Amino acid sequence: MNPIFLLLGALSAMLGVGLGAFGAHGLKTIISPELLAVYQTGVTYQMWHALGLIGLALIQPQAPDSKLLKWSGWLMFVGILLFSGSLYLLALLNLKWLGMITPIGGVCFLTAWFLITLFATQHIRHSDHNNRNK
């Protein structure tokens, strides 16, 4: 298991729960409903990708040297920072220019999932090849 992705995933999930609670209870009367929705989108994507990091930590022992899985994990983490982080700051500070950073985080997320798809495809081909040669 890759302990760094497990740690980053667990910390991201813990922060996601805390930030979600803060948004639901602390920000409800402070920011507009539109900005609260932006904030909540950040929380949602953070939580899903925190679980993605934990999942990566659990499957990485199947291929401990896989560059695809390592890159995927780092891209997920950077995606959390850029995508969710920019949405939190945009909602809290109402700085519209931060919205230009959000898509970069989204591309990190998409690329991470694409790399996992490549890893799975390679793993399936390798398994099929081994099964045919038995």
Image (cartoon, rainbow, N blue to C red):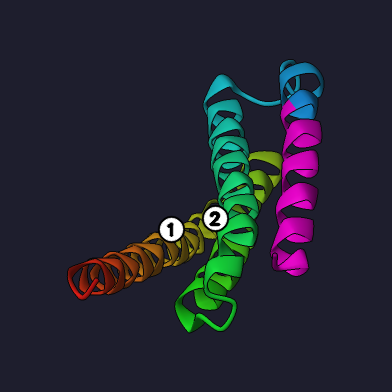
Residue denoted by label 1:
106
On screen, 78 above or below 87?
below
Task: Tell me the SS state at disc 1.
Answer: helix
What segment carries the magenta color?
Answer: 1-20
Residue 44 located within the stretch drawn in magenta: no
Percent from the top left, x then y, of residue 40?
Answer: 59, 31
In terms of image quadrants, where is residue 76?
bottom right
Residue drawn at the location 34% of the way across and 69% of the way down: 123
Percent from the top left, x then y, of residue 4?
Answer: 76, 68
On screen, 25 above or below 70?
above
In which quadrant is the N terminus drawn?
Answer: bottom right
In which quadrant is the C terminus drawn?
Answer: bottom left
The type of residue carrying mark 2 is Phe
Residue at the left extreme of this rendering: 132
Q: Is residue 95 visible?
A: no
The type of residue carrying mark 1 is Gly
Percent from the top left, x then y, of residue 88?
Answer: 66, 45
In terms of image quadrants, where is residue 73?
bottom right
Residue 83's disc number? 2
Residue drawn at the location 17% of the way across and 69% of the way down: 132
**Cβ–Cβ below 8 Å for labels 1 and 2?**
yes
On screen, 18 above or below 60?
above
In terms of image quadrants, where is residue 23?
top right
On screen, 4 above or below 71?
above
